[in-house]
Image (cartoon, rainbow, N blue to C red):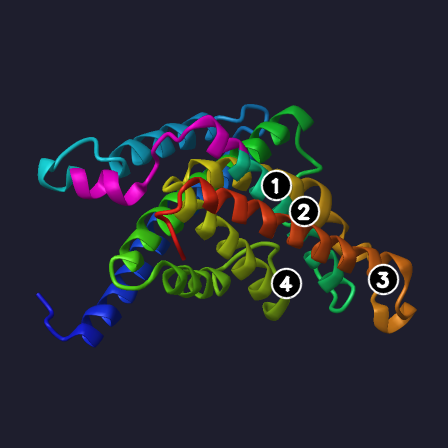
Amino acid sequence: MIQNPVLRRIAGVIWAAIAAWVIALFLQAIWSALILANLRTTPAIPWAAPAILVMVWLAWRYLAGNGPPASTSEYRRRHLRARAIAMPIFLWSLLAGALSIAALAGCWIAMTRIVRMPGSGLLELSAYPALNVSVLVFTGSLIGPFMEQAGFWGYGQMILEDHFRPRTAIIILSIMFGFGPHPPPGSVLWPRFVFYSLASVSFGMLAFYTQSILPGLVTHIGADLVFFTLIWPRDSTRPLIAETGLDLSFCLSIALAIGFGLLAGLSFRRLAGHNPRCSL
Protein backbone atom coordinates (compact mmCIF):
# COMPACT_ATOMS: atom_id res chain seq x y z
CA MET A 1 0.00 0.00 0.00
CA ILE A 2 1.44 3.37 -1.03
CA GLN A 3 1.64 5.70 1.98
CA ASN A 4 2.80 8.93 0.32
CA PRO A 5 -0.39 10.86 -0.65
CA VAL A 6 1.16 12.37 -3.78
CA LEU A 7 2.40 9.01 -5.04
CA ARG A 8 -0.95 7.46 -4.15
CA ARG A 9 -2.74 10.02 -6.31
CA ILE A 10 -0.32 9.50 -9.20
CA ALA A 11 -0.87 5.76 -8.92
CA GLY A 12 -4.62 6.39 -8.93
CA VAL A 13 -4.38 8.40 -12.16
CA ILE A 14 -2.30 5.67 -13.82
CA TRP A 15 -4.67 2.93 -12.68
CA ALA A 16 -7.71 4.94 -13.83
CA ALA A 17 -6.14 5.49 -17.27
CA ILE A 18 -5.28 1.80 -17.68
CA ALA A 19 -8.72 0.61 -16.56
CA ALA A 20 -10.57 3.18 -18.67
CA TRP A 21 -8.69 2.58 -21.91
CA VAL A 22 -8.51 -1.22 -21.66
CA ILE A 23 -12.23 -1.53 -20.96
CA ALA A 24 -13.14 1.06 -23.62
CA LEU A 25 -10.93 -0.21 -26.46
CA PHE A 26 -10.53 -3.98 -26.09
CA LEU A 27 -13.89 -5.01 -27.52
CA GLN A 28 -13.87 -2.11 -29.98
CA ALA A 29 -10.64 -3.51 -31.42
CA ILE A 30 -12.25 -6.93 -31.69
CA TRP A 31 -15.27 -5.32 -33.38
CA SER A 32 -13.02 -3.68 -35.98
CA ALA A 33 -11.47 -7.05 -36.79
CA LEU A 34 -14.86 -8.78 -36.92
CA ILE A 35 -16.45 -6.23 -39.22
CA LEU A 36 -13.54 -6.39 -41.66
CA ALA A 37 -13.69 -10.20 -41.67
CA ASN A 38 -17.47 -10.07 -42.13
CA LEU A 39 -17.30 -7.71 -45.10
CA ARG A 40 -14.49 -9.64 -46.78
CA THR A 41 -16.03 -13.12 -46.40
CA THR A 42 -19.84 -13.00 -46.22
CA PRO A 43 -20.98 -9.37 -46.66
CA ALA A 44 -24.59 -10.47 -47.24
CA ILE A 45 -24.83 -11.87 -43.70
CA PRO A 46 -23.95 -9.44 -40.86
CA TRP A 47 -22.83 -12.16 -38.45
CA ALA A 48 -20.34 -9.82 -36.77
CA ALA A 49 -23.20 -7.94 -35.11
CA PRO A 50 -24.61 -10.77 -32.93
CA ALA A 51 -21.11 -12.06 -32.21
CA ILE A 52 -19.89 -8.75 -30.75
CA LEU A 53 -23.16 -8.07 -28.93
CA VAL A 54 -22.79 -11.34 -27.04
CA MET A 55 -19.25 -10.36 -26.09
CA VAL A 56 -20.41 -6.92 -24.91
CA TRP A 57 -23.18 -8.49 -22.83
CA LEU A 58 -20.75 -10.92 -21.17
CA ALA A 59 -18.23 -8.14 -20.51
CA TRP A 60 -20.91 -5.87 -19.06
CA ARG A 61 -22.12 -8.61 -16.70
CA TYR A 62 -18.59 -9.27 -15.51
CA LEU A 63 -17.85 -5.57 -14.99
CA ALA A 64 -21.12 -5.30 -13.02
CA GLY A 65 -19.88 -7.87 -10.49
CA ASN A 66 -21.08 -11.17 -11.90
CA GLY A 67 -18.74 -14.12 -12.18
CA PRO A 68 -15.57 -15.05 -10.31
CA PRO A 69 -13.72 -14.12 -8.27
CA ALA A 70 -16.29 -13.35 -5.58
CA SER A 71 -13.70 -11.24 -3.74
CA THR A 72 -13.83 -8.54 -6.44
CA SER A 73 -17.58 -8.69 -7.10
CA GLU A 74 -18.49 -5.69 -4.95
CA TYR A 75 -15.56 -3.67 -6.30
CA ARG A 76 -16.69 -4.34 -9.88
CA ARG A 77 -20.34 -3.56 -9.15
CA ARG A 78 -19.45 -0.27 -7.45
CA HIS A 79 -17.03 0.88 -10.13
CA LEU A 80 -19.31 0.17 -13.08
CA ARG A 81 -21.90 2.44 -11.40
CA ALA A 82 -24.73 1.17 -13.62
CA ARG A 83 -27.53 1.53 -11.09
CA ALA A 84 -31.17 2.31 -11.83
CA ILE A 85 -32.34 5.80 -10.88
CA ALA A 86 -35.69 7.48 -10.25
CA MET A 87 -37.61 8.45 -13.39
CA PRO A 88 -37.66 12.25 -12.73
CA ILE A 89 -33.87 12.29 -12.36
CA PHE A 90 -33.49 10.05 -15.40
CA LEU A 91 -35.61 12.39 -17.54
CA TRP A 92 -33.77 15.51 -16.37
CA SER A 93 -30.47 13.80 -17.08
CA LEU A 94 -31.60 12.88 -20.60
CA LEU A 95 -32.59 16.51 -21.19
CA ALA A 96 -29.21 17.75 -19.93
CA GLY A 97 -27.46 15.18 -22.11
CA ALA A 98 -29.47 16.02 -25.23
CA LEU A 99 -28.84 19.76 -24.80
CA SER A 100 -25.14 19.07 -24.32
CA ILE A 101 -25.00 17.05 -27.53
CA ALA A 102 -26.80 19.82 -29.42
CA ALA A 103 -24.24 22.33 -28.10
CA LEU A 104 -21.39 20.02 -29.09
CA ALA A 105 -22.87 19.68 -32.57
CA GLY A 106 -22.75 23.46 -32.98
CA CYS A 107 -19.21 23.53 -31.61
CA TRP A 108 -18.03 20.79 -33.98
CA ILE A 109 -19.64 22.36 -37.05
CA ALA A 110 -18.05 25.71 -36.21
CA MET A 111 -14.63 24.09 -35.86
CA THR A 112 -15.00 22.35 -39.24
CA ARG A 113 -15.42 25.82 -40.75
CA ILE A 114 -12.04 26.80 -39.27
CA VAL A 115 -9.98 23.73 -40.22
CA ARG A 116 -10.62 21.15 -42.94
CA MET A 117 -11.93 17.82 -41.67
CA PRO A 118 -12.35 14.42 -43.37
CA GLY A 119 -15.81 13.69 -44.66
CA SER A 120 -16.85 10.62 -42.68
CA GLY A 121 -16.28 8.62 -39.53
CA LEU A 122 -17.23 5.36 -41.23
CA LEU A 123 -15.57 2.84 -43.50
CA GLU A 124 -16.52 3.04 -47.17
CA LEU A 125 -19.59 0.81 -47.16
CA SER A 126 -21.46 1.87 -50.29
CA ALA A 127 -20.58 -1.35 -52.12
CA TYR A 128 -22.33 -3.54 -49.54
CA PRO A 129 -26.06 -4.34 -49.04
CA ALA A 130 -27.82 -1.38 -47.42
CA LEU A 131 -29.72 -3.44 -44.83
CA ASN A 132 -26.59 -5.23 -43.64
CA VAL A 133 -24.67 -1.96 -43.50
CA SER A 134 -27.46 -0.46 -41.38
CA VAL A 135 -27.22 -3.40 -38.96
CA LEU A 136 -23.45 -2.99 -38.66
CA VAL A 137 -23.64 0.79 -38.22
CA PHE A 138 -26.33 0.47 -35.54
CA THR A 139 -24.32 -2.21 -33.76
CA GLY A 140 -21.23 -0.02 -33.87
CA SER A 141 -23.22 2.82 -32.30
CA LEU A 142 -23.88 0.54 -29.30
CA ILE A 143 -20.43 -0.96 -28.71
CA GLY A 144 -18.52 2.29 -28.27
CA PRO A 145 -21.02 3.86 -25.83
CA PHE A 146 -21.37 0.72 -23.71
CA MET A 147 -17.65 0.10 -23.33
CA GLU A 148 -16.59 3.76 -23.09
CA GLN A 149 -19.23 4.52 -20.47
CA ALA A 150 -18.13 1.48 -18.49
CA GLY A 151 -14.43 2.26 -18.85
CA PHE A 152 -14.35 6.02 -18.41
CA TRP A 153 -17.36 7.30 -16.50
CA GLY A 154 -17.78 4.06 -14.62
CA TYR A 155 -14.44 2.57 -13.60
CA GLY A 156 -12.10 5.43 -14.52
CA GLN A 157 -14.08 8.20 -12.84
CA MET A 158 -14.84 6.13 -9.75
CA ILE A 159 -11.14 5.36 -9.30
CA LEU A 160 -10.28 9.05 -9.63
CA GLU A 161 -13.07 10.08 -7.25
CA ASP A 162 -11.40 7.89 -4.63
CA HIS A 163 -8.32 10.13 -4.85
CA PHE A 164 -9.58 13.59 -5.90
CA ARG A 165 -12.54 15.89 -5.54
CA PRO A 166 -15.24 15.05 -8.12
CA ARG A 167 -14.56 18.21 -10.14
CA THR A 168 -10.86 17.39 -10.37
CA ALA A 169 -11.63 13.76 -11.25
CA ILE A 170 -13.88 14.85 -14.13
CA ILE A 171 -11.24 17.27 -15.47
CA ILE A 172 -8.44 14.67 -15.34
CA LEU A 173 -10.63 12.07 -17.02
CA SER A 174 -11.72 14.52 -19.72
CA ILE A 175 -8.10 15.28 -20.61
CA MET A 176 -7.42 11.54 -20.86
CA PHE A 177 -10.45 11.02 -23.06
CA GLY A 178 -9.75 14.04 -25.24
CA PHE A 179 -6.40 12.67 -26.38
CA GLY A 180 -7.86 9.29 -27.39
CA PRO A 181 -7.96 7.72 -30.87
CA HIS A 182 -11.41 9.04 -31.72
CA PRO A 183 -13.28 9.40 -35.01
CA PRO A 184 -13.36 10.80 -37.54
CA PRO A 185 -10.03 9.27 -38.61
CA GLY A 186 -7.51 11.76 -39.94
CA SER A 187 -9.12 14.72 -38.18
CA VAL A 188 -7.01 17.57 -36.80
CA LEU A 189 -6.00 17.08 -33.15
CA TRP A 190 -7.02 20.34 -31.49
CA PRO A 191 -10.70 20.41 -32.53
CA ARG A 192 -10.99 16.70 -31.79
CA PHE A 193 -9.46 17.25 -28.33
CA VAL A 194 -11.79 20.18 -27.58
CA PHE A 195 -14.85 18.26 -28.73
CA TYR A 196 -14.17 15.01 -26.89
CA SER A 197 -12.97 16.73 -23.72
CA LEU A 198 -16.20 18.73 -23.54
CA ALA A 199 -18.22 15.59 -24.25
CA SER A 200 -16.40 13.85 -21.41
CA VAL A 201 -17.21 16.70 -19.03
CA SER A 202 -20.90 16.28 -19.87
CA PHE A 203 -20.81 12.51 -19.38
CA GLY A 204 -18.81 12.90 -16.18
CA MET A 205 -21.34 15.34 -14.73
CA LEU A 206 -24.20 13.04 -15.68
CA ALA A 207 -22.49 10.09 -14.00
CA PHE A 208 -21.68 12.06 -10.85
CA TYR A 209 -25.00 13.86 -10.34
CA THR A 210 -27.05 10.70 -10.95
CA GLN A 211 -24.50 8.26 -9.52
CA SER A 212 -25.18 6.13 -12.60
CA ILE A 213 -23.77 5.79 -16.11
CA LEU A 214 -27.13 4.75 -17.57
CA PRO A 215 -28.31 8.28 -18.54
CA GLY A 216 -24.92 8.94 -20.14
CA LEU A 217 -25.17 5.62 -21.97
CA VAL A 218 -28.51 6.54 -23.60
CA THR A 219 -27.19 10.01 -24.49
CA HIS A 220 -23.97 8.52 -25.87
CA ILE A 221 -25.81 6.10 -28.16
CA GLY A 222 -27.97 8.89 -29.55
CA ALA A 223 -24.93 11.13 -30.05
CA ASP A 224 -23.04 8.44 -31.98
CA LEU A 225 -25.98 7.86 -34.30
CA VAL A 226 -26.38 11.60 -34.96
CA PHE A 227 -22.70 12.32 -35.56
CA PHE A 228 -21.92 9.22 -37.62
CA THR A 229 -24.93 9.61 -39.91
CA LEU A 230 -25.72 13.35 -40.05
CA ILE A 231 -22.75 15.50 -39.04
CA TRP A 232 -19.38 13.86 -39.80
CA PRO A 233 -20.27 12.77 -43.37
CA ARG A 234 -20.85 16.46 -44.26
CA ASP A 235 -17.62 17.81 -42.76
CA SER A 236 -15.63 17.96 -45.99
CA THR A 237 -18.39 19.88 -47.80
CA ARG A 238 -18.45 22.81 -45.39
CA PRO A 239 -16.52 25.82 -46.73
CA LEU A 240 -13.76 27.27 -44.59
CA ILE A 241 -14.32 30.78 -43.25
CA ALA A 242 -10.81 31.59 -44.51
CA GLU A 243 -12.34 31.23 -47.99
CA THR A 244 -15.82 32.69 -47.44
CA GLY A 245 -15.36 34.99 -44.46
CA LEU A 246 -17.78 35.10 -41.56
CA ASP A 247 -21.25 34.17 -42.78
CA LEU A 248 -24.66 33.43 -41.34
CA SER A 249 -24.07 29.68 -41.22
CA PHE A 250 -20.93 30.03 -39.10
CA CYS A 251 -22.64 32.51 -36.76
CA LEU A 252 -25.60 30.18 -36.36
CA SER A 253 -23.34 27.27 -35.41
CA ILE A 254 -21.66 29.45 -32.76
CA ALA A 255 -25.08 30.56 -31.50
CA LEU A 256 -26.17 26.93 -31.40
CA ALA A 257 -23.16 25.97 -29.29
CA ILE A 258 -23.58 28.86 -26.85
CA GLY A 259 -27.37 28.74 -26.61
CA PHE A 260 -27.72 25.01 -26.07
CA GLY A 261 -24.64 25.06 -23.83
CA LEU A 262 -26.35 27.56 -21.52
CA LEU A 263 -29.55 25.50 -21.51
CA ALA A 264 -27.52 22.39 -20.72
CA GLY A 265 -25.90 24.23 -17.81
CA LEU A 266 -29.33 25.12 -16.41
CA SER A 267 -30.44 21.50 -16.77
CA PHE A 268 -27.34 20.26 -14.95
CA ARG A 269 -28.04 22.77 -12.20
CA ARG A 270 -31.57 21.42 -11.85
CA LEU A 271 -30.19 17.88 -11.92
CA ALA A 272 -27.76 18.73 -9.13
CA GLY A 273 -30.68 19.99 -7.04
CA HIS A 274 -32.21 16.51 -7.06
CA ASN A 275 -29.19 15.20 -5.14
CA PRO A 276 -27.74 17.97 -2.94
CA ARG A 277 -25.26 15.53 -1.40
CA CYS A 278 -23.49 15.32 -4.77
CA SER A 279 -21.58 18.59 -4.97
CA LEU A 280 -18.76 19.16 -7.42
* Circle 1 residue: 98
- Work out how far the residue at label 4 is from the one at label 2, CA to CA, in angstroms: 20 Å
- Which mark is first along the chain, 2 or 3? 2
Task: Tell me whether circle 1 and circle 3 mark residues in contact (CB < 8 Å).
Answer: no
Q: Amino acid at mark 3?
A: Pro
First in sequence: mark 1 or mark 3? 1
Which residue: 90% across, 70% down? 245
Task: Tell me, for residue 85, which label it has, or none.
Answer: none
**For residue 65, side relative to residue 243 (left or right):** left
Say what secondary structure mark 4 lies in. loop
According to the picture, the residue beneath numbered tag 2 turns out to be 102
Q: Secondary structure at mark 1?
A: helix
Local crowd size for mark 2, using a 10 Å CA cut-off: few (<14), some (14–19), many (≥20): many
Earlier-in-chain disc, 1 versus 4: 1
Dominant secondary structure, magenta = helix
| Residue ID for mark 4 | 187
Q: Earlier in the sequence, mark 3 or mark 4?
A: 4
- On the image, numbered disc 3 is attached to which residue? 239
Mark 4 burial class by Cα count in 10 Å: few <14, some 14-19, many 20+: some
Amino acid type, mark 2: Ala
Whole-percent x, y for residue 209 in the image? 42, 46
Residue 24 seen: no
The magenta stretch is: 74-91
